[in-house]
Amino acid sequence: MLIMPFQRFHQRAQQRLQQASALWFVVFAISAAFMTYFSMYAFRKPFSVAMYDGQTLFGMDYKVILIFAQVLGYLLSKFIGIRVVSGMMHDRRALAIILLVASAQLALFLFAVLPAPLKPLAMFFNGLPLGMIWGLVFSYLEGRKTSELLGAGLSATFIVASGMVRSVGKALIVYADVPEFWMPFLTGLIFMPLLLISVYALSMIPEPDATDEELRLKRQPMTAADRWQLFGQYWFGLSLLILAFLLFTGLRDFRDNFSAEIWQALGYGNEPAIFTYAGVRIAGMVLVALALLMFIRDNFRAFTANHIAIVLGCFILGYSTWLHQQHWLDSKIWMVALGTGLYLAYIPFNCFLFDRFVALAGGVANAGFLIYLADSAGYTGSVGLLLVKHFYAADISWLNFFVSAIYTTAIIGGLLVTMSWLYFRWRFIRNGQQFQEETQLQKQPLASVAATRLK
């Protein structure tokens, strides 16, 4: 009996959003998406703020094993998401988000109660469902004329949420004496009500209207044939972007997972708020810059602007690190500049870049497929960087290894993205010329067309 009034309320809310002003719609959609993904971080990241001092397993640092296990689960989730997220029916997305996060919370409970040798298994199952949340949330926002602005708001979670939920987790340990293994589960419980409210709000967002579809192409679930056709048509340029994203994701994940060790090496290890300090400042600079892409209506120019933003991010990565090594930048300022460059390069892949690409490529497509294709490779980079650090650079400090990874990512990543732009510029200009020629032929009389083709 309670279901019918609930459904009517939901339908009325959707109708009001469809009729609402553009400003109110943007505020509502950003808030719902941001808080949904923000809440998800509370189930994924807090465990890494604990140090697990002196603990080892199979001769390896215990924290490294836990992070490695979670990243493996997250990596597998990205491969699963290539099919699941790109083919998800729209009316099932909200329930899927709730079930996936609930599974991750159950894994955190197992992390608290299982013996030490089995805890990495719990972290694997924690990462396994969470890797599909981003694509499901972004599917509510893609394919709209305001997608850049909406995506910028959602992407703020990459920068702000991780630091904030870490601060909550650290505070539970420092101020409430919560055991390190129970802290992740309790942090998840704190954020569960917010998650449920946010997902319900997210489900109210109406589908893109006719104007959105005209400007950005209608987004549809993709079959296996659709996915292969799109990738096969642009495989070279997409491969360059995916390789670059592999580097950016590896560096971003390393910085995120071992931020406690990096801040400690810089002299800020006992300040819980330091994680939020950098995140808020980075978000302000990066997201304002990327949101401005919304005002570029031409899809190819916006696609080009995304490439420029990524290359600029690579430059900031390398240059700020060099300045810090010359003692011309304070450690706090360096970490903010470093994060700004890293996220300027990383965030476009998760929404803006592929949203514009789909609008350019046409056909049956959605950004979720390309995001998860890139993500599956990206988290392979995360696993690879962890393995390199442990087996080939174990005697190098976290900070020195991090600096070496920064220079490698900045140089190679910047070159790959530059090559990608040159390729896509050639492809889309050629496609545009072919389209113009076909249009001109269609306008000619039949005899003239035949004569033209005979020539």
Image (tube, helix red, strand yellow):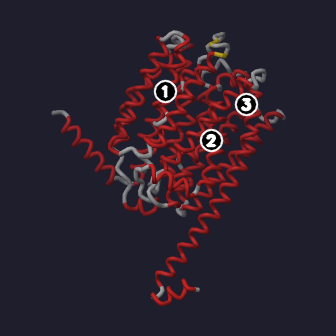
Q: In the image, which is nearer the foreground, mark 2 or mark 3? A: 3
Determine whether the residue tagged by mark 3 lies in a helix, strand or loop.
helix
Q: Amino acid at mark 3?
A: Phe
Residue 336 left/right relative to 153: right
Q: CA distance from mark 1 to mark 3?
A: 25 Å
Picture quarter with the N terminus:
top left
Residue under pointer 1: 42
Q: Residue shown at 37%/27% (left/top)?
A: 193
Q: Residue shown at 48%/24% (left/top)?
A: 125
The disc placed on residue 343 is: 2
Residue 391 left/right relative to 107: right
Task: Give the image location of residue 248, x and y in percent.
Answer: 65, 40
Residue 255 left/right relative to 215: right
Residue 189 showing in the rendered view: no
Q: Quadrant location of residue 411?
A: top right
Residue under pointer 3: 402
Q: Earlier in the sequence, mark 2 or mark 3?
A: 2
